[in-house]
Image: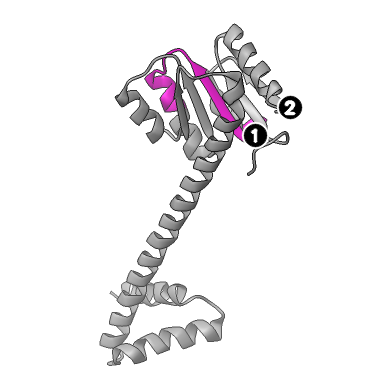
């Protein structure tokens, strides 16, 4: 996702005057696709409908309900989120970051700073997404490795094979059936459970 005029921005702000100022600032920063939502009730449903590229929230003081909404959003519909607040504390900032807010600006809404802030929000979101994706791939690879090791152990015991021969049996079965080794390992483990 790249920043620029083609980016759809959702502004969430219950204060009409503040929302108008923020919308004007977005348009002056050359963001033409801007949608304003003034009600946080049903926010997740609205976000799914609007399908924004970036979410900008402007609040006087973020409360637990708003942060809970952001947590739900970041889990269900991951999007870069920039939050502008008038006042804050370290605990609130931590909760906001845990809820998926990529950029948290305290008393810093200035028209000339909108574009760099949104560019940073998008970049930070993309960097965190790459890290999360890599972590998930690593976790999955570790789980797959554990299953393969377990299946090898079963084959070594039940067929009296060495470790290399047990792995080769898994690998050759996977290749001949056009499946992944981990899928064959699952089948070996299921077969043993069925026999018990």
Q: Residue furthest front?
A: 112
- Disc 1 on helix, strand or loop? loop
Residue picked out by circle 1: 51
Task: Write down the residue under mark 2.
Answer: 32
Percent position of residue 30, x then y: 72, 27
Q: Quadrant of residue 85?
A: top left
Q: Is residue 85 above or below residue 52?
A: above
Numbered-mark total: 2
Q: Tell me which numbered mark, 1 or 2, is placed earlier along the sequence.
A: 2
- Decide if residue 148 is in sight here: yes
Q: Which numbered disc covers residue 110?
A: none
Give SS at disc 2: loop
Q: Residue at x 63, y 36 (%)?
A: 53
Q: Is residue 171 above or below residue 49?
A: below
Residue 79 seen from this side: no
Q: Is residue 116 above or below residue 180?
A: above
Whole-percent x, y for residue 120 in the image = 53, 37
Q: Residue 40 in the image: x percent, y percent? A: 53, 18
In which image quadrant can residue 16 be found?
A: top right
Of residue 122 and residue 68, the one placed in the foreground of this image is 122
Q: Nearer the viewer, residue 184 or 49?
A: 49
**Residue that appears at 60% across and 13% down:** 19
Mark pair 1, 2: CA separation: 15 Å
Image coordinates of residue 187 in percent, x first then y, are 42, 74
What segment is highlighted magenta in the picture? 48-69
Task: Please tell me how crowded label 2 is: few (under 14), some (14-19), or many (20+) other residues with Cα within 10 Å.
Answer: some
Image-based side of 61 in relation to 47, left or right: left
Which residue corresponds to the image point at 39% horizontal and 18% vertical from the top-left?
63
Residue 161 in the figure: left or right of residue 174: left
């Amino acid at each position: 996702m790249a920043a620029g005029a083609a980016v759809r921005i959702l502004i969430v702000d219950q204060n009409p005057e503040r929302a108008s100022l923020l919308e004007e600032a977005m348009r002056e920063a050359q963001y033409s696709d801007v949608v304003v939502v003034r009600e946080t009730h049903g926010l997740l449903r609205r976000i799914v409908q609007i399908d924004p590229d970036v979410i900008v929230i402007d609040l006087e003081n973020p409360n637990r309900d708003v942060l809970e909404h952001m947590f739900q959003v970041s889990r269900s519909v991951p999007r870069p989120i920039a939050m502008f607040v008038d006042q804050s504390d370290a605990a609130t900032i931590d909760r906001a970051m845990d809820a998926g807010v990529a950029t948290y600006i305290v008393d810093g809404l200035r028209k000339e700073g909108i574009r760099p802030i949104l560019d940073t929000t998008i970049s930070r979101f993309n960097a965190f997404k790459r890290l999360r994706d890599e972590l998930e791939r690593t976790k999955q690879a570790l789980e797959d490795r554990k299953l393969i090791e377990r299946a090898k152990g079963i084959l070594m015991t039940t067929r009296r094979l060495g470790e290399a021969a047990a792995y080769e049996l898994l690998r050759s079965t996977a290749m001949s059936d056009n499946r992944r080794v981990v899928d064959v390992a699952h089948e070996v483990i299921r077969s043993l459970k069925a026999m018990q």
